[in-house]
Image (cartoon, helix red, strand yellow):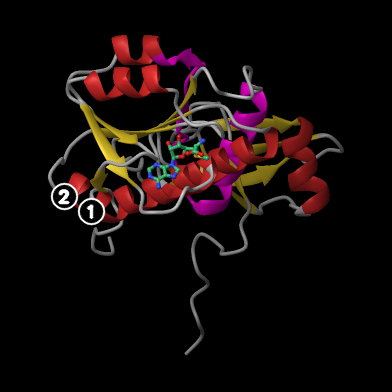
Amino acid sequence: MTAIPAWPPQSAPRLYVATALGEGVSVQVDGNAAHYLISVMRVKADDIVLLFDGRSGEWAARARDIRKRDLMLDCVSQTKPPETVPDFWLCCAPIRKGRIDLIAEKACELGVAKLQPVLTRRAVVDKLNLDRLHTHLVEAAEQCGRTALPELGEMVKLDVLLRNWPADRHLFFADETGGVPIGQALGSHRGPAAFVIGPEGGFDPIEREAIRAHPCAVPVSLGPRILRAETAALAATAIWMGLNGDWNEDEL
Ligand code: SAM
């Protein structure tokens, strides 16, 4: 019996596009994305490329009019519905370049809904290249099969974040000086959530007091050792995803 080829082809490249996708939509791809498809992935006419736009799921698109620096892709069918994104925000202080990039990439793979940079007094970095972080989010989403990109917030100061905090969202505060054991904290606080992670220098006492005083705040311990900020950010996110996120859903 001849094997029926998998659809969409397993080898099909995956690309994020800003264009709203849908039945019969055609997308012109140029620049780096075209170079990747044409020169790296050697896409030929009629080949399938998987597209997602962050809102309408994933679409198989057929390639045509392939030129040196651009090509056209015609949506032929939806291959994945829009993903249901776990309602989790990762709020972290800006840390050194390579490490904040790691947080962005891994947070996307882990499934966060929003990455919110928070400026704290002891942060050694006080500005971020959001375009670069957005690129990491896109590349991670293309690789891990997400159809939605995490929202990337503009950097805000901690006091502004706390003042504007949504009343229905648990604010799990990763406090290196101690807090509720994470399993217990997450087990008793379901629903929209966020973790706030400090910078290399940690939170200063005034910041710690301000966070703990917030009505939505739950101080959480991530164990007896002092973790690097990126370790704390990714460990806390992974545990939330495992206990309250979408890692427990049966295979669709
Ligand atoms: N300067 C701090 C110190 O030496 O105590 C360390 C800060 S740590 C590198 C960066 C952030 O990771 C902390 O602000 C906290 O949010 C989180 N973190 C690290 N270890 C933690 C733990 N055991 N429990 C809770 N949060 C932790």
Q: Label 2: which residue?
A: 187
**Residue drawn at x 57%, y 45% as measured from the top left:** 140
Q: Nearer the viewer, residue 45 or 34?
A: 34
Q: Nearer the viewer, residue 156 or 184?
A: 184
Residue 135 painted magenta:
yes
Count up the numbered dots. Answer: 2
Give SS at disc 1: helix
Few, some or many residues within 10 Å of mark 1 (<14, 14–19, 20+): some
In this image, 171 relative to 168: left or right?
A: right
Residue 156 lies, with reference to residue 55, above or below; the image says: above
In this image, 165 relative to 176: left or right?
A: left
| Marking on residue 183 | 1
Q: Look at label 1 and name its amino acid.
A: Gly
**Residue drawn at x 23%, y 19% as measured from the top left:** 214
Q: Nearer the viewer, residue 104 or 61?
A: 104
- Tell me the distance, in whole angstroms, between the alpha carbons under discs 2 and 1: 6 Å
Which stretch did the figure color magenta?
130-158
Few, some or many residues within 10 Å of mark 2 (<14, 14–19, 20+): few
Instruction: Identify the image quadrant of residue 97.
Output: top right
Instruction: Identify the image quadrant of residue 12.
Output: bottom right
Q: Residue 30: give x, y in percent of width and height.
A: 75, 31
Is residue 141 visible from the viewing direction of this image? no
